[in-house]
Amino acid sequence: MQLVAFSQEAPAHLLANYLNQQGIIVSYQLLEGEHPHAVLLKDDKRWEEARLITQDFLRDPRQAKYQQAAWQQGQVVNMQRSQQDMSPQLQMLMRSPFTLLVLVACTLVYLGSLMGWFSQLQHMLSFQPPALLVENQQWWRLLGPAFLHFSALHIVFNLLWWAILASQIEQKFGTLNLLLVFVVTALLSNYTQYLHTGPNFGGLSGVVYGVMGFVWWCGWLRPQWGLHLSKPLVGFILFWLILGYADLLWVSVANTAHTVGLVSGCLLALIYTRLGR
């Protein structure tokens, strides 16, 4: 009889060692699914006792008595936050170099703006039309506004969604494909926003909406690829767009960049799902 199952291996072994020391015979078994590390109870008559111990363990698995039981049985179970103990999302992020690179770049630019260099950074990263870039060769300005943020809420919102969604794309399709999604969505959203409002804008929002659209449509058109965006989140995206256009938000919103980013991400997903295997 299955007593409990964990997403990580270490707590399953720790609980099993303690229960066996208490005379409640259990075993560890690796299963399939979201919580594959199971503790199985051998004697059904000890169910209630085992359940109470398990509840106490779940409240605080780092109590010394559990590790002591492991030592007495000749096993040392490490409950520190190693990579094996990280959440799946954090593990995925740590294996996604381009996702991390964008996170670091945006953070450094924002810290620089807090230190009093905002004007210089804005002057260096602001968008300029292609005709002018042909003369000065400052081509990074096509993507530059994506790294410039104006408030803590602005950057936290953008980087949170970038970390979650971009790491999925990078793990599934590789770094070069995520780079392509980034460049296309940033370029199109920045250029159209420039045409609409001029160069005074910034933020990763256009790209974030792009990766949202990409994950959304890939999950819809090719669910077997494993990318997924829940219906409530899709509803939130569209509702936020409507609020921006209705001018009901307390901040200035780059509506054009958001819309073009979302549409370009969806179109890229359409291309990938039609041409990719």
Image (spheres, helix red, strand yellow):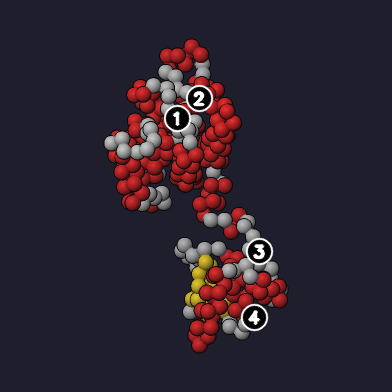
Q: Does residue 78 lie above or below 266 as drawn?
A: below
Residue pictured at 34% horizontal, 33% vertical? 255
Q: Secondary structure at mark 2?
A: helix
The circle drawn on residue 122 is: 2
Local packing at callout 4 (Cα closer than 10 Å; few below 14, some 14-19, many 20+) is some
Name the kind of residue labelled 1 in the image.
Gly
Image marks 4 and 1: residues in contact by CB distance under 8 Å: no
| Above-or-below relation of 275 to 65 | above
3D distance between C-alphas at marks 1 and 2: 9 Å
Q: Quadrant of the C terminus?
A: top left
Q: Nearer the viewer, residue 201 or 226?
A: 201
User: Residue 78, which numbered label?
Assistant: 3
Residue designated by label 4? 21
Please say if the residues under marks 1 and 2 sit with CB atoms less than 8 Å apart. Answer: yes
Query: Tag 4: residue type?
Result: Gln
- Per the model, the C-alpha gap separating discs 2 and 3 is 47 Å
Q: Are marks 2 and 3 in contact (CB under 8 Å)?
A: no
Report if the CB atoms under discs 3 and 4 are less than 8 Å apart. no
Q: Earlier in the sequence, mark 3 or mark 1?
A: 3
Q: Quadrant of residue 157?
A: top left
| Residue beneath the point at 53% across and 79% down | 52
Q: Which of the two discs, 3 and 1, sits closer to the camera? A: 1
Which amino acid does the dot numbered 3 rest on?
Asn
Tell me which label, 4 or 1, sits earlier in the chain.
4
Judging by the rendered image, the residue that carries numbered circle 1 is: 202
Report the residue at 47% width, 33% height from top: 150
Horizontal side of 25 relative to 187 (left or right) equals right
Q: Which mark sits nearer the N-terminus, 2 or 4?
A: 4
